[in-house]
Image (tube, coloured by chain):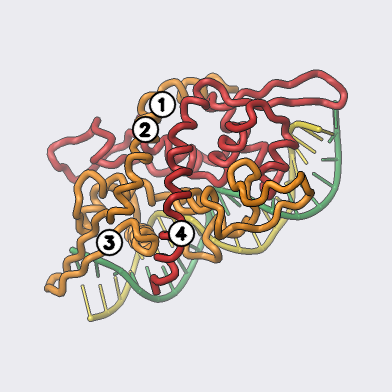
Chain colours: A orange, B red, C yellow, D green
Amino acid sequence: MQYGTRGFGTYPEVTKGECQENRMKENSEVFSMSESCPIRNVLDRFGDKWSILVLLVLSDEEKMRFNELHKAIGDISQKMLTVTLRTLEADGLVSREVFPEIPPRVEYRLTLLGKSLMPHIHGLVKWAKDNQEVIVSKRKQYA
Amino acid sequence: MQYGTRGFGTYPEVTKGECQENRMKENSEVFSMSESCPIRNVLDRFGDKWSILVLLVLSDEEKMRFNELHKAIGDISQKMLTVTLRTLEADGLVSREVFPEIPPRVEYRLTLLGKSLMPHIHGLVKWAKDNQEVIVSKRKQYA
DNA sequence: CGGGATCCGGTGCGATACTG
DNA sequence: CAGTATCGCACCGGATCCCG
């Protein structure tokens, strides 16, 4: 996540099909547009292990504390929860509010940007629910 | 991908919020439902580096050969393209048709199941296109 | 052409311990 | 409570070689 250019960033090229900037003749080399390729940006962001899960959990509580998130997800380490939340914060998907109390309290919630993403995530999740049995059985019968 | 239970599989628990099977009182231990948790299944499947990209490329050509895919994506290694295609095939999202010719020809295309997933992927991609500039700038201004 | 097999480095991520 | 710091390793994925 926080390493290098973070995952996909290492791979500068884009797909011909979707990143239309460089639909040239049909030249040999597709050249780098990594920063501006939205596909790579999505995949980079959500290809990691926990982001979507954190977003999902946040999305049906609206405002959660660190340990609430931790318990809700169950098997994420503190480290990865922290890292994931920081990344989501950096991307503007999640807001982090610190209350100067003792003991400390920190509240996380989705930003508007974050909320605007959720329908698509939920779409995926719904699809997954509808089709997981088929997929699991297909996978089994696949030698 | 092909290791162990493949990525997310290693982490058996589920989220309380979405995998409703185990909304118990509020007991300490959420216990394993990995096989039946659709969220984990989605994330497991698409959390990898290339699956979505391959699906996207396939989705706007309908029928592609191995090397076409390879060129279209540009920076994927043969190995990962093979592995990704095999996984997608095992899951029933992509079909693989071998023509017994010389030189050999193999055609990949989305299955109906695969096609049914694409709207959601495209939703994500559209969101990414619409919001990437905001995100990139947010990330920069984030110390 | 469309892969499979093997080797191997970088890193994602968990476990553990410590702090304000 | 909400983290940070350090350590270690599995595993992801690229490079290379081979094969029908």
Residues under numbered marks 2 and 1 in contact, where contact means CB atoms less than 8 Å apart: yes
The residue labelled by disc 2 is: B38
Crowding at dot 2, Cα within 10 Å, few <14 / some 14-19 / many 20+, comes out as many
Q: Quadrant of the N terminus of chain B?
A: top right
Give the label on residue B133, or none.
Answer: 4
Q: Which residue is at a point 37% across and 24% down the rendered structure image?
A: A130
Q: Is residue B121 left or right of residue A119?
A: right
Discs 1/4, front: 4
Discs 1/3, front: 3
Q: Which residue is at a point 66% across and 24% down the rendered structure image?
A: B96
User: Are the numbered discs 3 and 2 placed on the same chain, yes or no?
Assistant: no
Q: Secondary structure at mark 2?
A: helix
Q: Earlier in the sequence, mark 1 or mark 3?
A: 3
Q: Secondary structure at mark 4?
A: helix
Q: Amino acid at mark 1?
A: Gln
Q: Amino acid at mark 4?
A: Glu
The x and y percentages for residue A14 are 63, 50
